[in-house]
């Protein structure tokens, strides 16, 4: 990943003691695997809590969040270091504007990521979104198209605004299961994940300062879960999975060269065209000619022979006439020569 000055991770000390201990233990798993850094990309629509989630993970206000301020088009990268370990988080602008994909924002994100390696992707959406619409599917497809199929294999769903009261008659766990299941199904379909692949994991987040806390001061969800250590643990699980990290290079951004794409198929296509198209047509024509010849009536055959014989007879007559004319010319020349000889004798 491109070098970015890493500040000391002082925000880690702002967490409750229990949360600090949990985070140290979780991040220690990366050190055990000789992984000295972790790069996390945060993506999603605007207004879903991407920047707030980044602030919650870092424990600092690294990005300004305002309900009355529109997002900037410039991605923001922050790097924090602690005990030899570096955490890089890239916050990106919303990918939707005016009810459709913001191609400008997507292109800016791609150019910003050029030359960087992504270990984990956080796809952020709201838990209280209730349903997956066509716009959500467009975002999923756009990300898969821009960064390749491996993008979603490094992803996890982050559902914000998780401190909510579900509709009457619906339990919290049931509501979470339906909402997360709908997003997982949409990602599987739109990103083209194989049936054998696992669903994209999800985690619940509540970034609000009004989030409930336990006796130790840790932020908890309605089900009592301390969500920040769970979020970081899921991130580490994805980072240490069998899926390789994604290096964002020019080929990934621009796509394969159109001149190189599929060129090895050309000889095979030519051979296949000959055997599947040209050869059958040639045989069909020969067959039609043979059948046509066999089906001709006797009078057609005799007429053709007559025309052929007549043509030969006419050619013979023409040859005889030409020979006769040549002989006549020779005789005439001889007669003229004899007349000349007689005139010479008389003069003598």
Image (spheres, rainbow, N blue to C red):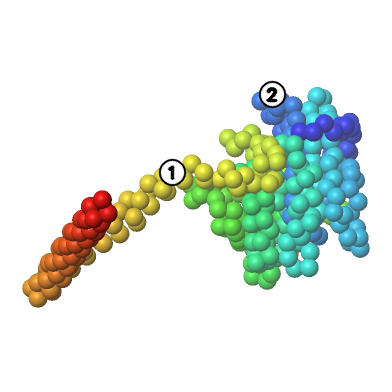
Judge depth for marks 1 and 2 and give the one in front. Answer: 1
| In the image, farthest residue toward the front | 348
Task: Answer yes or no: is residue 305 visible.
Answer: yes
Horizontally, residue 276 falls left or right of residue 174, namely left
Give x and y (percent) for residue 213: 81, 49
Residue under the image location 79 percent in, 28 percent down: 85
Horizontally, residue 153 falls left or right of residue 226, namely left
Q: Identify whether 158 is placed above or below 2.
A: below
Task: Answer yes or no: is residue 173 visible.
Answer: no
**Quadrant the N terminus occupies:** top right
Give x and y (percent) for residue 96: 76, 61
- Tell me the tag on residue 34: 2
In the image shown, does 155 or 22 lie closer to the viewer? 155
Give x and y (percent) for residue 188: 57, 54
Horizontally, residue 167 falls left or right of residue 317, namely right
Q: Identify whether 230 is placed above or below 85.
A: below
Q: Identify whether 36 is placed above or below 124.
A: above
Q: Earlier in the sequence, mark 1 or mark 2?
A: 2
In the image shown, does 175 or 202 lie closer to the viewer? 202
Residue under the image location 73 percent in, 61 percent down: 101
Q: Do the numbered discs 1 and 2 sit on residues whose CB atoms are within 8 Å?
A: no
Horizontally, residue 23 falls left or right of residue 314, namely right
Name the residue tied to disc 1.
267
Asked where in the image residue 2 lies, by quadrant, the reply is top right
């Amino acid at each position: 990943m491109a070098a970015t000055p890493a500040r000391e991770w002082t925000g880690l000390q702002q967490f409750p003691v229990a949360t600090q201990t949990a985070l140290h233990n979780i991040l220690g798993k990366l050190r055990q695997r000789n992984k000295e850094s972790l790069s996390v990309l945060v993506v999603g629509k605007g207004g879903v809590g991407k920047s707030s989630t980044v602030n919650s993970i870092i424990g600092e206000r690294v990005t300004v969040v305002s309900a009355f301020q529109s997002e900037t088009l410039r991605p923001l990268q922050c790097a924090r270091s602690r005990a030899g370990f570096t955490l890089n988080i890239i916050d990106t602008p919303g990918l939707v504007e005016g009810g459709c994909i913001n191609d400008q924002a997507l292109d800016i994100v791609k150019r910003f990521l050029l030359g960087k390696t992504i270990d984990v992707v956080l796809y952020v959406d709201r838990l209280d979104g209730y349903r997956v619409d066509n716009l959500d599917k467009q975002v999923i497809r756009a990300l898969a198209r821009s960064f390749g199929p491996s993008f979603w294999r490094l992803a996890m769903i982050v559902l914000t605004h998780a401190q909510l009261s579900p509709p009457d008659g619906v339990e919290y766990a049931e509501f979470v299961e339906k909402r997360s299941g709908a997003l997982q199904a949409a990602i599987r379909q739109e990103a083209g994940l194989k049936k054998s692949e696992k669903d994209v994991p999800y985690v619940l987040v509540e970034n609000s300062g009004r989030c409930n806390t336990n006796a130790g001061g840790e932020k908890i969800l309605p089900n009592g879960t301390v969500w920040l250590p769970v979020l970081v643990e899921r991130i580490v699980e994805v980072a240490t999975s069998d899926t390789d990290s994604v290096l964002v290079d020019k080929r990934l951004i621009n796509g394969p060269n159109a001149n190189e794409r599929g060129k090895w198929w050309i000889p095979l296509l030519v051979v296949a065209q000959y055997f599947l198209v040209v050869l059958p047509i040639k045989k069909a024509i020969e067959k039609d000619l043979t059948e046509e010849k066999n089906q001709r009536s006797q009078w057609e055959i005799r007429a053709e022979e007559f025309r052929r014989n007549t043509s030969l007879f006419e050619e013979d007559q023409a040859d005889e006439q030409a020979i006769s004319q040549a002989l006549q010319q020779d005789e005439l020349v001889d007669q003229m020569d004899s007349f000349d000889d007689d005139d010479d004798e008389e003069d003598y």
